[in-house]
Amino acid sequence: MLIIIGYVVVTFCVLGGFVIAGGKLSALNQPVEVLIIGGAAIGGMIVGNNGKALKASMAAIPMVLKPSKFNKALYLDIISVLFLILSKARSQGMLSLEADIDAPKDSEIFSAYPKLLEDHEIIEFITDYLRLMVSGNMSAFEIEALMDEELETHHHELEVPANAFQNVGDGLPAFGIVAAVLGVIKALSNADLPPAELGLLIAHAMVGTFLGILLAYGYISPIAAIIRQRNAEHSKVYQCIKVILLSSLNGYAPQIAVEFGRKTLFSHDRPTFTQLEDHIREVKASNKAQ
């Protein structure tokens, strides 16, 4: 929703300011300039990315139009699941987690959090490393190194759409200049026209520069910025899980491990110590009631 509001503000202020200054909107109606700039931008994007990158970039567009799913409620669900899992492992042994890991949908712990269960990537990340912990063949240092490698790969994959849109945004001003130069060439090739008509052709040519810069900094580059913000929130989920699991591997009690994980979260989504303590108390009571 915010991106739509932002686009409305950009469009209204730029075009409104132009009209207030005495400009005529009809002068900006240059379909050929739009064709040159838009076609060059789309073609450059196709040339500069493989099929997987293009698919990921297109899939990212609906994502930026939706509110972020990475919020305090999601983090509390993750912390709750990990607390219950680690508490079960501490009281019944790591082998007791095998059924939960192999079939999360059938697990009493995971199934209590249906929204989290729908996120297959997060569930897979948790169960994969719990499986390694259950095997008991890897040290905390080895698991941490493996986590870091996976998180780095995950970060690079998330950055692909952002980089694609950023490259398009960076290229649009240059494509605008290309369109403007072509317009100037057309105008100069008709230098024998009366000054008024020649001036009109040059004005039409300048629309290309205007559109290239406006599209770049007002519409396309902000998409890359939003994707990067969402990526940072996405990565924070995995960092939180990583810290909690490693804290448990290093011998800390579940209550302390989830507190370590809480500290990794961004301040605007991080529950306070008291909120987390109260939430864990409710989770304990609910689990005992079952």
Image: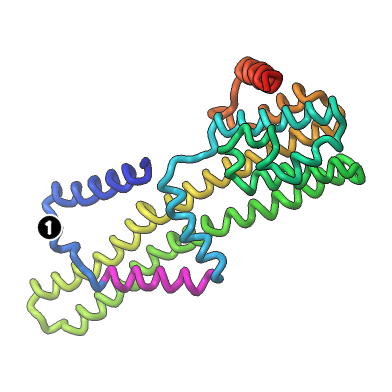
Label 1: which residue?
24
**Where is 65 relative to 236, above or below?**
below
Q: Is 17 situated left or right of 261 in this image?
A: left
Extent of the magenta region: 33-49
Residue, x 37% and y 41% (percent of image)? 2
Q: Please state which of residues 150 and 133 is positioned toward the viewer in this rendering.
A: 133
Three-letter code for the amino acid on which mark 1 is drawn = Lys
**Where is 280 relative to 127, above or below?**
above
Residue 123: quarter of image: top right
Q: Please state which of residues 7 and 279 is positioned toward the viewer in this rendering.
A: 279
Placement of the C terminus among the 4 image quadrants: top right
**Where is 228 relative to 284, above or below?**
below
Residue, x 34% and y 58% (percent of image)? 215
Predominant secondary structure, magenta span: helix
Residue 273, can we see it? no
Does residue 38 show up magenta in the picture? yes
Residue 213: quarter of image: bottom left
Q: Secondary structure at mark 1?
A: loop
Does residue 117 show up magenta in the picture? no
Q: Is 182 situated left or right of 122 in this image?
A: left
Q: Farthest residue to the right: give it.
A: 137
Residue, x 57% and y 34% (percent of image)? 74
Residue 101, can we see it? yes
Placement of the N terminus among the 4 image quadrants: top left
State the image coordinates of residue 223 (x, y, percent, origin top left): 44, 52
Q: Please state which of residues 94 and 240 is positioned toward the viewer in this rendering.
A: 94
